[in-house]
Image: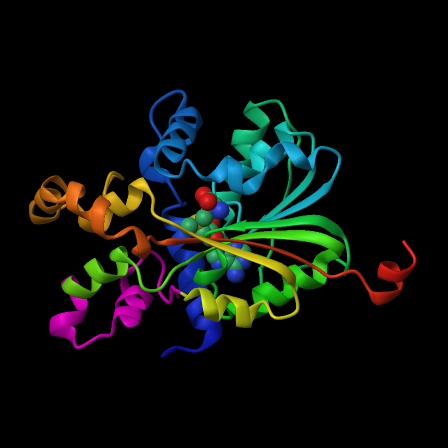
Amino acid sequence: MATRSIPSLKDEVRQFWNSDPCGTRYLEGENEFEAHARARNDLEPHIPEFAQFASAAGLRVLEIGVGMGADYLEWLKAGALATGVDISPASLAKARRRCERAGFHPDLRLADAEHLPFPANTFDIVYSYGVMHHSPETQQCLSEAYRLLKPGGTARIMLYHHPSLTGAMLWLRYGVLGGKSLRRAVYDHLESPGTKSYTKAEVRTMMAGFEDIRIKQVFSPGDLLLNLPSYRFQSWPYRLGWKLYPRFLIRKLARRWGLFLLISARKPMPLLYAIMP
Ligand SMILES: C[S@@+](CC[C@H](N)C(=O)[O-])C[C@H]1O[C@@H](n2cnc3c(N)ncnc32)[C@H](O)[C@@H]1O
């Protein structure tokens, strides 16, 4: 589906998140990060159960794509030895400020999910929420997560689901007249350029080396358009659409077309460990 070279697409992705770090529209006044955390909790209430922050006390955690650091701060609060990376310096600066204001010394680094600067078998948990589908080579991001996990370690990853209601709305807006498929509408118009979405079966194929793969599709308040529209959808027709969206019907009929796939999986132990624990 790619129409640009991978380096130039990755530059566009970096620029997109650098000019508008994820969730910026929820920052409010003095206590901006608290407001962001509240909005995130309202819109994605499934995150704490999925991430299992408290289980990470004393463990080495790598968060790939920290954005403004909402989840990264939770790892620190839980007592994890947490390292975070992102490709966007502006996002990292905000994440750093957030953690320092909360009294922590974060280990945050500028790095690309497709080529991470850590030795193999380093982390007990690799967590990445809503990141890898933005990177041109999503499969390479998953391979890096696998490489960096210790044997027996756990990956917890959120990727966008196909098909989704969000994709269908983008298709109605841009796909019908533009002759684009649902996936192409997502690729061109959902957040940063080149965003991908996956079926559960595709995720299983991409994660073939992992074991105990569990995938849960989540229908969230965002699917009900209870989020704030991004800067791209601020004109009055969009705002009206946001108001008139038939939430009751959507809630009843569209649960299988939520945007999020919550994926957890384990890196297998080498055979020798399995025989002689
Ligand atoms: C939708 S935001 C999610 C941020 C955070 N995980 C959250 O849930 O708020 C996507 C993030 O992924 C980062 N990102 C995209 N491609 C990346 C890559 N190849 N390597 C590292 N980070 C990347 C972006 O800079 C951005 O901060």
Name above or below for residue 216 compared with residue 182. above
Give me the residue at 37% from left, 67% from top: 194
Name above or below for residue 161 compared with residue 177. above
Viewer can see residue 94: no
Looking at the image, residue 232 sits to the left or right of residue 124; the answer is left
- Which colour scheme appears in the figure? rainbow
Residue 122: x %, y % from top left = 77, 53
Give me the residue at 57% from left, 38% from top: 72
Front-most of residues 34 and 156: 156
Question: Does the magenta segment cover residue 183?
Answer: yes
Front-most of residues 119 and 220: 220
Segment colored magenta = 173-197
Residue 34: x %, y % from top left = 43, 24
Residue lying furthest right: 276
Front-most of residues 273 and 80: 273
Name above or below for residue 212 compared with residue 237. below
Viewer can see residue 168: yes
Give me the residue at 41% from left, 35% from top: 45
Question: Does the magenta segment cover residue 235?
Answer: no
Give me the residue at 40% from left, 63% from top: 12
Name above or below for residue 82 compared with residue 104. below
Residue 5: x %, y % from top left = 44, 78
Q: Quadrant of the N terminus?
A: bottom left
Residue 271: x %, y % from top left = 84, 66
Q: Quadrant of residue 193?
A: bottom left
In this figure, what is the number of numbered marks? 0
Q: Quadrant of residue 169?
A: bottom left
